[in-house]
Image: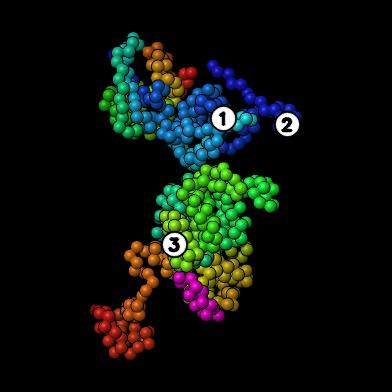
Amino acid sequence: MEQRILIPLYFDQVAPRFDLATEVSIVSIAKDGGILETKTVVLPRASAEQLCHLVLLEKIGVVVCGGIEDEYYQYLKWKKVNVLDSVIGSYKDVVKRLESKTLQAGDVIR
Amino acid sequence: MNTFQRTQVKGLFDTPIELPSLIDEIPLGVVVLDIKRRVVLINRAFETLTGFSIEDAQEIPCYHIMRSRLCVQKCPLKKMDSNSKSVLVESDLINKERELIPVLINLSPIKDTEGNLTGFLETVEDLRPLKEVDGKSHQAYSYRHLIGKSPEMTRIFQTLPLLAQSDSAILITGETGTGKDMLAEAVHQASYRAKGPFVKVNCGALPETLLESELFGHRKGAFTGAVEDKPGRFRLAHNGTLYLTEIGDLPLPLQVKLLTFLDDKVVFPLGSTKGFQADVRVIAATHRNLNLMVKERKFREDLMFRLNVVRLHLPPLRERGDDIRLILDHFINVFAERFRKNIKGLSKKSLKVLMDYPFPGNVRELRNIIEYAVNICPKGQIQFTHLPAYLSETKHDYELSKSQTRETYEWSTSFATSEGERSDHKTWASLEREMIIEALLKNKGRRNKAADMLGWGRSTLWRKMKQYKIDAG
């Protein structure tokens, strides 16, 4: 079964703040690790609530982000979304780690 | 895994010291960035605040580590060069514990010995303790050191936090002793500039030439006796607030210079052609009637309009009703504690004397009276004999001071009340009508007693009520 992953972006990097991101990438990864689909969504304004809504709407299983407030972190956990927060690195490097299933919360990819 | 190189500082002491050991002891979060805004060094306080260790943070773009709103929305470092001055900004960050923390960030350039930009220095202060104090300080009829529950004071307490958040110039008016200085300081403390300096200048205290150098600074050799560069109060107040008290006493030539500053925000020290961009909020205060001074050409009209962006008027104590009792009790407690005396309030007579006294010196005078009384009173209640003797003799003095301050009051209230109802020209008829209504109210509508109170016969009162169309029901 494919896994859908949402990554808030800040230029080509993982966004440092979940609540301030205005652009997100949604990546679908197959069970064997191959990328099935990627799409970018531009939000009209930065809002943690809207982003959470998008996560549920798009049936996202994993969120990869930088800083996230505990309120939204707990909400997503409650909605059975796996949140890998405090991740630092470029979008490309993060996707590579996701493909190899080696990405963890707090990872700093130089 | 990145190995962190410990930087050594040579030349400060006989033996080299490690830089981290020096900055680790600073209670503010400190971040040193290279010219590409990547982290070079962070101190222990920053590690504690954000949860990132130096091993995590080194060589990483600062926005990943700082994670403040400022980084994403409008990073001031993007435009900062070697000539830029430090910038102080209030923002928030999210740490690794997923807490949203209000912070005050100071950003400044780091230059090499030749003045070239080599990096940036950021300091980050956790504002949570300050915000908690903020919440507490607004309780129980007070705002910081200001006390009051009268409608005028409540209105000031309510608008003050909103005004503090803006950078607009404020003009505070009010009689002497009403608390103009305290109000200015409260505005500063409630603003995001609270961690910056609050510089007070009394415009009436110095002669013109000295005041110019005091305010705007001077270069070495600008005039005889200028043996070294002097920064001036505007520069000292950079990133903070400059409070100009007695603005009505500011000489005309300096008014022009102040006007130029308010327009351009650039300070030119005496003898210097190079300006300094000062980020300063100006608060001015006066007990004078600036309108009258403008008419007399003693104060520039354009300067008055620039300072008069926001007007705060502090009412005189005699018009603050129940506040007198509140402030009385407050000062009795303060001074009883300070002088370690067992004082149990005021006797009935001394309370009546104080409640009837007009307080031309306002809260300052009230405080002095209580300080004197608490000093004199050995213990128990403060008796009439413990109060200063002049309290029973001051009716004439008050009338005099009232006439002096009346002008300022009327000028201020005519601005403060939009309806203009309380403004200057009341006719005798309207005053008489008010007197009759007041007397009727005090006597619960009983005309006999109201007539007695006014010193009229019952028929005179009836006639005047008819004349002014007052229906006592």
- Labelled disc at residue B117: 1
Q: Which residue does the numbered mark 2 point to in the structure image? A: B13
Q: The disc numbered 1 marks a residue on which chain?
A: B
Q: Secondary structure at mark 2?
A: loop
Q: CA distance from mark 3 to mark 2?
A: 55 Å
Q: Which residue does the numbered mark 3 point to in the structure image? A: B313
Residue B408 is situated, as x and y percent measured from the top left of the image, at 46, 68
Depth check: B327 or B111 in front? Answer: B111
Q: CA distance from mark 2 to mark 1?
A: 26 Å
Residue A7 is situated, as x and y percent measured from the top left of the image, at 36, 23
Of circles 3 and 1, which is in front?
A: 1
- Name the quadrant of the C terminus of chain B: bottom left
Q: Is residue B16 above or below residue B318?
A: above
- Dot 1: within a 10 Å radius of its alpha carbon, few (fewer than 14), some, or many (20 or more) residues? some
Q: Secondary structure at mark 1?
A: strand
- Name the quadrant of the N terminus of chain B: top right
Q: In the image, is residue B396 part of the stretch drawn in magenta?
A: yes
Q: The disc numbered 3 marks a residue on which chain?
A: B
Q: Secondary structure at mark 3?
A: strand
Q: What's the residue type where badge 1 is placed?
A: Leu
Q: Is residue B194 above or below residue B397?
A: above
- Disc 2 and disc 1 in contact, CB within 8 angstroms: no
Residue B47 is situated, as x and y percent measured from the top left of the image, at 54, 30
Task: Specify whether residue B425 is in view.
Answer: yes
Q: In the image, is residue B12 part of the stretch drawn in magenta?
A: no
Residue B97 is situated, as x and y percent measured from the top left of the image, at 46, 31
Q: Which portion, as a residue range, is magenta?
A: B392-408
